[in-house]
Amino acid sequence: HRGMSVVLHTLWHFNIGHAMFDGLYPAFLSLVQFARQDEPFRTILMGTHDKSVDAKMPGAYERSEKTLGMIGGLGHLTLDSLGGLAEKHAPLHRLEEVVVGRGLNGQKHDVNANLSLGGCRLLDGCRAYR
């Protein structure tokens, strides 16, 4: 897969808010830390679909996955499209460049019980994310 890929895992990515701010934002901030935030990237989602959510909200996962792929500009891949982790003979995929991991880039909770996005001020991550 040519170009930059960003690997992320998020719970409840059927909800676009969780997908964008619990999953993509911390991974995007990793790109900011490497000064690569202006380059197009492919989103690789390592989460799976909950069948009960699929039954109640058909297409919710796919809409969020497609949106994350559009934000990065190079589309998206999912664990299923990569062959899954449980497959005995899953195909190999070559990623030209990949950023994996997000460290402590998620939401922060301060002593005043305020939530804020990590790296928003220090790295100007929120402006870059817009």
Image (cartoon, grey):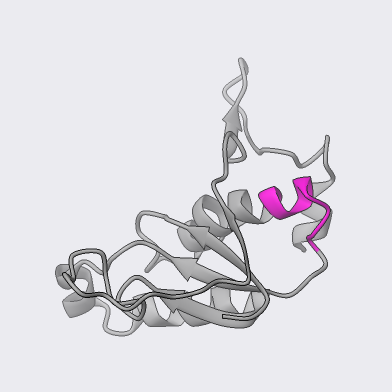
Q: How many marks?
A: 0
Taking 23 as reference, is 101 above or below it? above
Q: Identify the residue at horizontal 27%, vertical 78% (top origin).
A: 57
Does 43 sit left or right of 85 as displayed?
right
Taking 124 as reference, is 85 above or below it? below
Residue range of the region highlighted in magenta in the rendering = 29-37
User: Residue 50: where, in percent of width, then height?
Assistant: 21, 66
User: Residue 20: where, in percent of width, then height?
Assistant: 56, 61
User: Residue 103: where, in percent of width, then height?
Assistant: 57, 37
Foreground pick, 104 / 4: 4
Taking 85 as reference, is 32 above or below it? above
Quarter of the image with the C terminus is bottom right
Q: Identify the residue at horizontal 22%, vertical 70% (top origin).
A: 53
Foreground pick, 93 / 100: 93
Q: Quadrant of residue 11?
A: bottom left
Quarter of the image with the N terminus is bottom right
Foreground pick, 87 / 114: 87
User: Residue 94: where, in percent of width, then height?
Assistant: 51, 74
Q: Identify the residue at horizontal 67%, vertical 38% (top origin).
A: 118
Q: Identify the residue at horizontal 16%, vertical 70% (top origin).
A: 88
Q: Quadrant of residue 107?
A: top right
Q: Is residue 35 magenta?
A: yes
